[in-house]
Image (tube, rainbow, N blue to C red):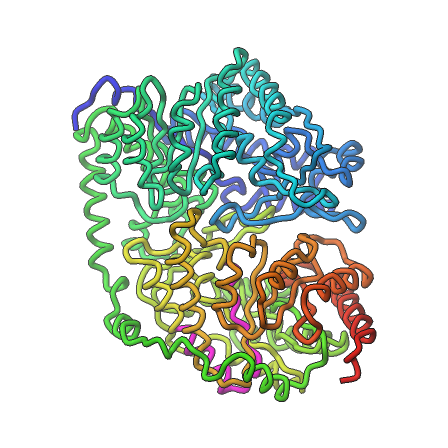
Amino acid sequence: MTSTSTAAAARATVHGYPRQGPHRELKKAVEGYWKGHVSADALGSTAAALRRATWQQLAEAGVHEVPTGDFSYYDHVLDTTVMVGAIPARHRAAVAADQLEGYFAMARGTQDVAPLEMTKWFDTNYHYLVPELGPDTVFAADSGKQVTELREALALGLTARPVLVGPVSYLLLAKPAPGVAAGFDPLTLLDRLLPVYAEVLADLRAAGARWVQLDEPALVQDRSPAELDAAARAYRGLGALTDRPQLLVASYFDRLGEALPVLAKAPVEGLALDFTGAAAGNLADLAAAGGLPGKRLVAGVVDGRNVWLNDFEKSLATLGTLLGLAEQVDVSSSCSLLHVPLDVGMEREIDPQIARWLAFARQKTAEVVTLARGLRLGTGAIAAELAANRADLAARSRSQLTHDPAVRARATAVTGSDGRRSAPYAERAAAQRAHLGLPLLPTTTIGSFPQTDQLRGARAALRAGRIDAAAYDERIAAEIREVLAFQEKAGLDVLVHGEPERNDMVQYFAERLTGYLATQHGWVQSYGTRCVRPPILAGDISRPEPMTVRWTQYAQSLTDRPVKGMLTGPVTMLAWSFVRDDQPLADTARQVALALRDEVNDLEAAGSSVIQVDEPALRETLPLRRAGHAEYLAWATEAFRLTTGGVRPDTQIHTHMCYAEFGDILRAIDDLDADVISLEAARSHMQVAGELATAGYPREVGPGVYDIHSPRVPGAHEATALLSKGLEAIPAERLWVNPDCGLKTRGWPEVRAALENLVAAARGVRAELPDAAS
């Protein structure tokens, strides 16, 4: 490749960066603030230092234009709600009294006021706070956060680009506020919202912004003509403003499709497009649309969602094609690097040769800078980097880690009967009722109990060698005894062992399966201060030995009530890991399912009559475009059935899902053929119960009545009200009573009180049922 006048202008940038800091400094500061140990001023100082360090690191790496505004104490969509003044009525007094306290009240709730609903950010494991809007919503601009952060970056002598959630995506991500009449469409508020964005843009221009990025990821989904027309109207209006910076409209996670010509024709100065994975089709679509003459294109050729090193030659070929389609082509990550860990260099326990296959945020930044230099100066300027990249890619493709003949032979031998239970649901349900002897409205929890400081300390002491395995096991056994004793005393019907030995519901299993890599510092924000370390699915998967049987069997020995065996399902094992990109996901899912099938069968043989295989990620992994839904759901549900298909009819299979829009996958939920499904329902006011009833779902359901992502303790009357609403949709003989999700992140005092209230509600409602005596 030779440099051209267009290529000479190529610059490096990214859409956003991890927020928490190399040692999760933000998490610790925010949680310290919640506990009263850190002042608001100290929290602000920690946040400002993290922003400054991020921008300086990006600039030193060679990034020409750093993003601002992507930093958040909790969630960038919640920040947008504050920016446009869409504060729910129940939170206005708190926000008016103390903006920071009110902000966290919207995110987490208080004992008296419920938080905003939380759900997944498109098909990622990041959660956002859902805006609540209605016909009476009054927007008001508050650009303080965005202006402050821009000025901080400019004061460092940097070129900075504020990044905002765009107005169309903001409204498409919103829901009608509680009490708003059914059928209200938040998008009807667009003309009311645009003047607020105009005011924010003017404020940013006055503060020194030359470009502002408006993120419109919702436009990569299937959109109606009316929604596309709203997007066209929005950007005609914003483009026509005279007092504004130059506008860069960004999309990511998939191809823009029919929205691409809409944005290409809009009077904005640039587009940022994703050219990785499912979004690779943007290249052909852009050419078909006639390109972006006279405009800037920010080309996302470095995958911002996965951790594998970039294929430089492939990316340069894409960039070379794009040179003829825009006035200026800059190089970027495909989306914010929020979705990947910070730095491979911090990982000391991954084989250095394997580590060379990986790229976290810092390495991806370096890749972007290298590609921009190659585009600007020609491939000769990056000859050494190209040679090293080719060698690393070849080493990965040849590795024995990625190819296990025995695993592949077993997966090839799977037949349709392997994924079918031996009896239909009606027969199974009767056998399970006889075997388990549970009351109407049986009570249970989702699996995990609080991970106390003592448990984390014991785990750290074991790693450091301060205690031996026997002492650690005794600590785990003591915790299980305490958890079982509490559940029996509280009156729960189906118990769990509490998972004290597990660090994370995916990582725990990944550390015990071949083909996975675990990190020590690979933290990624899931929501708020909740960070996870997604394992890396690098090779073929098998299970060397049982993973959960020992502690489940021990817990069952302590009680006559059934204790659930607890596993993470195959789709979630993929979705909450960084998956391999060198074979179809369906093939990887089958390998994981076969490994988990062995575990399910061993649990049953050890005496487990109830086994829960969690699939909270089934909905979030659904392709963003409907054209891919059928293929995905076919292999995803097959993987679940392959995991659970080998048990007896009287063994009850549960699954669990949370914080997603379940209405899109109701048929797939049925196709799982689980006996019982528990789902998030508290923040969404039991919406899913009605959706399942409308769809004719025939099996048992546990819609959650306790929102565990908030510190507040719901009273028995609240659980009773939700149960009563659930009974309007689901008959009592098929309704379970449980929290929304696992209790790992909560404290013991609130868990005890909330579960006691949950049991009291179930007993009270049960006593009023006509068939209670049975």
Q: Which residues are magenta?
A: 595-617
Q: Nearer the viewer, residue 320 or 666?
A: 666
What is the x, y in percent for residue 63? Answer: 38, 28
Left or right: 757 in relation to 585:
right
What is the x, y in percent for residue 20? Answer: 54, 42
Left or right: 443 in relation to 400:
right
Q: Nearer the viewer, residue 715 or 362?
A: 715
Q: Residue at x 48, y 42 (%)?
A: 338
Q: Is 350 situated above or below 4? A: below
Q: Residue at x 38, y 78 (%)?
A: 418
State the quadrant of the C terminus: bottom right
Picture mark count:
0
Left or right: 232 in relation to 354:
right
Residue farthest along the top direction in this orientation: 242
State the quadrant of the N terminus: top left
Residue 390 visible in rendering: yes
> Any magenta on residue 244?
no
Q: Residue at x 27, y 29 (%)?
A: 322
Q: Is 353 situated above or below 47? A: below
Residue 748 visible in rendering: no
Q: Is 41 situated above or below 487? A: above
> Any magenta on residue 596?
yes
Q: Nearer the viewer, residue 1 or 453?
A: 1
- Quarter-wise, where is residue 172 in the image? top right
What is the x, y in percent for residue 537? Answer: 37, 59
